Amino acid sequence: MAKKNIDAAYKLACERYAELGVDVGAALKRLLKIPVSLHCWQGDDVRGFENADGDLTGGIQATGNYPGRARTPAELRGDMDFVFSLLGGKHRVNVHACYAEFEKGQRVDRDELTAEHFKNWIAWAKKNRLGMDFNPTLFSHPMFNGFSLSSRDKKTRKFWIKHTIATRRIAAVIGKALGSPSVNNVWIPDGFKDIPADRMTPRKILADALDECFAEKFSPKHELDAVESKLFGIGAESYTVGSHEFYMGYAVKNQKLLTLDAGHFHPTEAIADKLSACLLFVPEILLHVSRGVRWDSDHVVIVNDELIAVAQELVRLNAFDRVHIGLDYFDASLNRIAAWVIGVRSMQKALLYAMLEPLKKMQDAEKSEDYASRLAWMETAKTMPFGAVWDKFCADEDVPLDTEWLAEVKAYEANVLAKR
Ligand code: RNT
Ligand code: ZN
């Protein structure tokens, strides 16, 4: 679209939003300041670099075999470079421990990992001025046999404790090197396929193991610990040790970050309403923005009611200093670059949409018990010229409009991905 048309549409949009008391320019500035942590694992179907042909275990699944997945660190970072070139704003990268890189003959197991094994990631993030988040990988490994940190087997448990400690140290190095805290998110798949006879013992073991993992203290300027709950996984349908109540309790007691993954609750349960409640009791939240279709299927994030509801809560709570936004999905059935671009841009669109609501009018109406007006203003927001503002954001950031980026992705597919 011609620049003059983008500007003209934007100008009209600003006038219309001003009638609702909404400052569009301020919203655009605010959106620019919100980073989204881009999960490296969408680029290679959660395979990592240890043994890329190994099975993905832990009750998660990437289905599909669309060609062009990244097979090497260089390919994965190259793909992410391209993705970032299509995104307005400054973002972060989210790396899992299984994406370690080894010099020839220098391979170590996960309990021996150090920041050395991530030096290329760190250098790349630094060069591109990206913050970087991190995760222990407690799945897809021979030491995971249905249980990791909550294993009754001491040797297994110790291995995973050592691994988790190693990742906290790595995250602290990352945060220091990049001048921005690295959120290290602990998610374990531990659970039972069928009905347990003892639900308490694994949870007690997990609480003690986490205490050991978190014993070492790091500056919150460098490293932040997050814990992620889940309802069930494939092959662990009846019982998950690290359930929501478990981690809510653990995070409150120990003042850790709580991770809310949109796919980790009952299929009809959404996370937006949890934010205000949790923020009263935990210091910060990590969002795993995902889209479950009938189960925790990790579909590509799109602008839907659930995503908008999350964005609205973030804006209404003005919680951007306490909520970290990370994407978490993996779809192997379509162009993976497009999957990333659609996810981040959807998150940003939802945020911008939420920032352009006539919030003052809605909240004033609520305070005066005028619920008809509150509802009317919410409905009015839905037909405002939001798209013109989004186009302006893209144009100002010098990235393609929604109508344009796909052509660039198709060209990249033909020139780069198709040659893999
Ligand atoms: C799994 C969790 C977890 C993983 C990533 C790869 O259900 O959502 O966050 O998706 O760690
Ligand atoms: Zn998650």
Image (tube, helix red, strand yellow):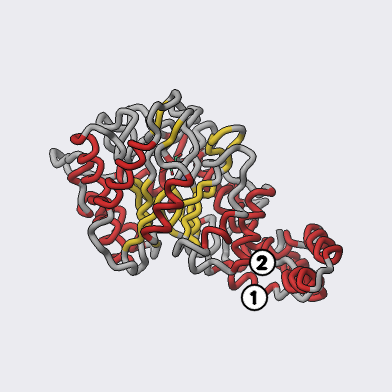
Q: Outermost residue, top direction?
A: 194
Could you tell which of marks 1 and 2 lies nearer the N-terminus? Answer: 1
Q: Could one spot residue 338 in this view of the protein? A: no
Residue 57 horizontal side relative to residue 292, left or right: left
Kindly identify which numbered label has been placed on residue 26: 1
Which residue type carries mark 1? Ala
Q: Which residue is drawn at 27% across and 48% down?
A: 164
- Residue at horizontal 56%, vertical 42%? 300
- Above or below, comparing residue 160 to residue 130 in the picture: above
Q: Nearer the viewer, residue 277 or 420?
A: 277
Label 1 sits on a secondary structure element that is helix
Q: In this view, does 194 lie to the left or right of 151?
A: right
Residue 267 falls in image quadrant: top right
Sort mark 2 into few (<14), some (14-19) or many (20+) by Cα contacts within 10 Å. Answer: many
The residue at 20%/51% (across/down) is 114
Q: Is mark 1 within 8 Å of ligand 2?
A: no
- Residue 213, percent from left and from top: 26, 51
Residue 127 coordinates in the image, percent (x, y)? 34, 63
Is residue 118 placed above or below 417 in the rendered structure? below
Amino acid type shown at disc 2: Met
Q: Residue at x 51, y 47 (%)?
A: 261
Q: Name the residue under label 2.
A: 355
Under circle 2, the secondary element is: helix
Coordinates of residue 328 in the picture (x, y in percent): 48, 45
Looking at the rendering, which quadrant does residue 168 occupy?
bottom left
Which part of the image, by quadrant, shows the N terminus? bottom right
Residue 374, x across and y down, in percent: 80, 65
| Placement of the C terminus among the 4 image quadrants | top left
Instruction: Report the number of numbered marks.
Output: 2
Task: Tell whether 309 sits left or right of 254.
Answer: right
- Visible in this render: residue 63? yes
